Amino acid sequence: MSQYLKNHWYVVAQKNELKDQPLARMVMEKPLVIFKGKSNKVGVLDDLCAHRLTPLSLGEIVGDSIQCGYHGWTFDCEGKCVSIPNVKKINNISVFSYPVIEKWGWIFIWMGKPELASQTPLPDFHVIDEEKWVGSGSMLNVSANCDLIRDNLLDLTHAKYTHKQTLATDEVDEVPIIAKKIGNMVSVKRVMKNIKPSPFFAKSVGYKENIIHRQTTEYTPGCNIVIRLRGNSAPGASENKKNGFRVLNAMTPETKTSTHYFWWLGRDYDQNNSELTQWMKDANARTFLEDKVVLEAQQQNMILNPNKNPIPSPMDKGIALAEKLNIELLERETLTPSPKRGVNNAR
Amino acid sequence: MSQYLKNHWYVVAQKNELKDQPLARMVMEKPLVIFKGKSNKVGVLDDLCAHRLTPLSLGEIVGDSIQCGYHGWTFDCEGKCVSIPNVKKINNISVFSYPVIEKWGWIFIWMGKPELASQTPLPDFHVIDEEKWVGSGSMLNVSANCDLIRDNLLDLTHAKYTHKQTLATDEVDEVPIIAKKIGNMVSVKRVMKNIKPSPFFAKSVGYKENIIHRQTTEYTPGCNIVIRLRGNSAPGASENKKNGFRVLNAMTPETKTSTHYFWWLGRDYDQNNSELTQWMKDANARTFLEDKVVLEAQQQNMILNPNKNPIPSPMDKGIALAEKLNIELLERETLTPSPKRGVNNAR
Amino acid sequence: MSQYLKNHWYVVAQKNELKDQPLARMVMEKPLVIFKGKSNKVGVLDDLCAHRLTPLSLGEIVGDSIQCGYHGWTFDCEGKCVSIPNVKKINNISVFSYPVIEKWGWIFIWMGKPELASQTPLPDFHVIDEEKWVGSGSMLNVSANCDLIRDNLLDLTHAKYTHKQTLATDEVDEVPIIAKKIGNMVSVKRVMKNIKPSPFFAKSVGYKENIIHRQTTEYTPGCNIVIRLRGNSAPGASENKKNGFRVLNAMTPETKTSTHYFWWLGRDYDQNNSELTQWMKDANARTFLEDKVVLEAQQQNMILNPNKNPIPSPMDKGIALAEKLNIELLERETLTPSPKRGVNNAR
């Protein structure tokens, strides 16, 4: 189990999870409290009151601050202690706070070196905001390392075996993939020409005849996957449908063996059909539960057999490239001193 | 997590828990069996049959002894094996037994050096027996170190934040405390003059106007807390009520991170009102469940963050004195050889 | 907790557990998958796909092979990989497979040195197949070391204390046993003359008067116990009944502290009475649940008290002989090189 890739933005919560109450969530083995103050500012702090170490998430949101539910110490979004009962002057007491950005209905946090946060872009989930794309998402917790979910999505041949009733097509494990690394992105493509659409495609679009099915899976670190799917009616079909899908996947390590898995599924057609939006969301959630069973069992086997290594297959090329990329990035994280420390060391 | 303070009497059970069946309970990581024989004698033994190590608590009380439920070996209240099937003469087989005293509706045991038991007094819970005081009690198991419960009770400012619907008064975190050590006791006092009574006080007494609210919390090791509360009608009020309460708290370590918490709540007025007694008991039990949530979360945070230290507040003085006292007593326990061994060593 | 005795055949499943789906079961800390192919051949493999370490038990039986439910790799009963999507020539990929024998309604596996499998006989459970004996069996998982179940069965005096409502007789802990080792078998005998039949005997046979009750318990390693019981009407009784029972017990280590316990209970009279067969099976299952409670509590106590040793009793002689036999066999397993390796070493 490798170390965490820290110098990346990770989704910590869905916007709609932040209501009147603070939210407790562990990320990279750190218990965090996430809260949205009255002025809509979001704070992410270590979930640990400076006073007596009680989780702040048991407390209450008071204005733009969070008040501990044990003895009332209060901290603002930057973690600064702003109130202690019976104490006039507070000397520099604080709880560690994390950089945070709210965007696309998700709350992103930064667990890495603080000085690198502002210069690092968010993962590219911009389609959520585009009018052309309509969809919805959710999250689930998976008791498996985030890399195992990444690998699941980088090898879609599993659709045939794990999702027999929904995503399976006969051809998905017959048509080879093209995998390549482009900068800090790994891309895996497959084009299946003139195939019977999967049950999910048939139902969500209404294909009656064969289609050309294009799959592109793009991985970028931290641990994000954008899947672009396209179904066009096959040449010679009497139908003439063209339909695009996007599956956005943001995997945030909870621990080395568990992951908060945030996802969004959108389409570029029939945008006003809210019934279809709901059906697609529900179908996707059920499909991911099938993955969850496999991934958690795989994780357990890996814990029980720490010295067993996978055997590569022709469909694993994207996984191999992603692993290599992660190792490089991890080495860079470990070796590069932070800018500030670099200055200090030079003195 | 410090060691256990052993040379003190601890409550192991409520009298009414000892009926026809033996009771299994772990204290200081030792599984114990507690049973009351036909002649009302109570035995506390290691819950471990000498024969094949089965828990004796699965067996039956036979006369004044306990019979193992596996092969019938039988042990008296002192742990002496008094019967083995098919064996005439039993050579000195026994299970370890603990000194035990039944008093005030509670069963006290001694986990320390046996020769110190008789010279050590019980914690002072005598009000349970006084006619003037009427009340009742119960127990709960809290997955937190007993010191965290002690600290909860030594800083009652938490009433305002943890018990908003019941014990909260606005002034409890504004009025300073007086904390002092008197011999082996730590005392914390607070007098809140002319305040609105807490919901609990208002309901249990019927105050309609302001009161003087006096709180005294007294800690004595092992891990016992006596809280004396008094509510007198404030000067100038048209009412003239004087009401006293006692909350007795006996915390017995189950493990380093869990505690058997025995309590009794009494009052010195309206003594024949059994409905009020029941209401007060139920209200107190609900209140302690609020503490339980906080304490267990605090304990988990302390396990996750072993190097984090609390930051003291002006309301923590009693806690600091109690910690200091415990460290002194623990050192004394560790250094002082037991009298008997002292004699042996001198030979 | 000693090591596993590996060079013996162990029951891993009941025949009727192998249906359309593969079965997952852990033996000696190894997760195994057990499946019966279309031609009735049984395979037992490590439950770990060679590809990405997912449990094969989540997959499907395809012909005489098992297909992984993640990416479709397929393995035959010998563990050989026979199909990988998009791969023409498979180079020697396999999953570890275990020798297996189906007999008497049970599936036996071999966890030891493969070259010793064929020369080692199965435990002797042949009565299951004899027309004279009619019965049925089942299994349960017990969270205790298999030796503790063995010891339970080698000292039947516990019937009086653990099974008060069913197997108890007053005399079982009064009449001495005769224990001896005969080759690799330990035998314990007891004859109780002219006693009141146990509730189980009375109900299953209909004795109204006293009987001679003979018990013989025979232990053979791995961890098998055959109990032969006989109830004959006592001399002088007006009845003249002769009834035999067999209890076959096959204990298979799941871990050092848990066991798959397979059993079969038969009788040599009233063979066509299927109602009686069912009643005996149900009664036995209930009785073993009483043992399960004791055994699991005993195991927990042994974990908590690793340095405590049992104290022997006159009824433990069989247990002592079995322990000695196991130590000898374990030493032999550890010291003796496997034949093949022996040859290699000599070069």
Image: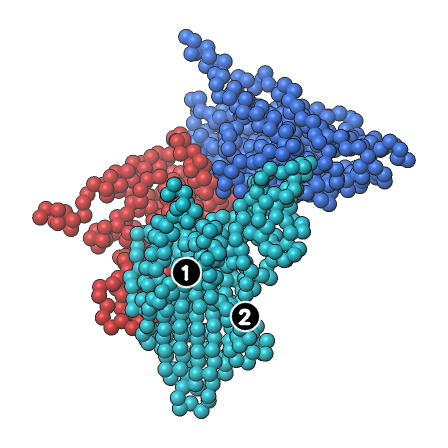
Chain colours: A blue, B red, C cyan
Which is nearer the eye, B259 or A121?
A121
x%, y% of residue B157?
Answer: 43, 37
Within the image, what quadrant is residue A124 found in? Answer: top right
Q: Is residue A102 visible?
A: no
Say if C196 sits above or below A275 in the image.
below
Residue at the image position 42 percent from the left and 36 percent from the top: B302
Chain letter behind tag 2: C
Residue at the image position 16 percent from the left and 49 percent from the top: B341
Residue at the image position 80 percent from the left and 37 percent from the top: A195
Kind of residue at disc 2:
Asp
Within the image, what quadrant is residue A33 found in? Answer: top right
Q: CA distance from mark 1 to mark 2?
A: 21 Å
Kind of residue at disc 1:
Pro
In the displayed orientation, state which residue is furthest to the front: C347
Q: Which residue is denoted by mark 1 in the rendering?
A: C221
Q: Are marks 1 and 2 on the same chain?
A: yes
Among the two numbered marks 1 and 2 on one chain, the one whose residue lies closer to the N terminus:
2
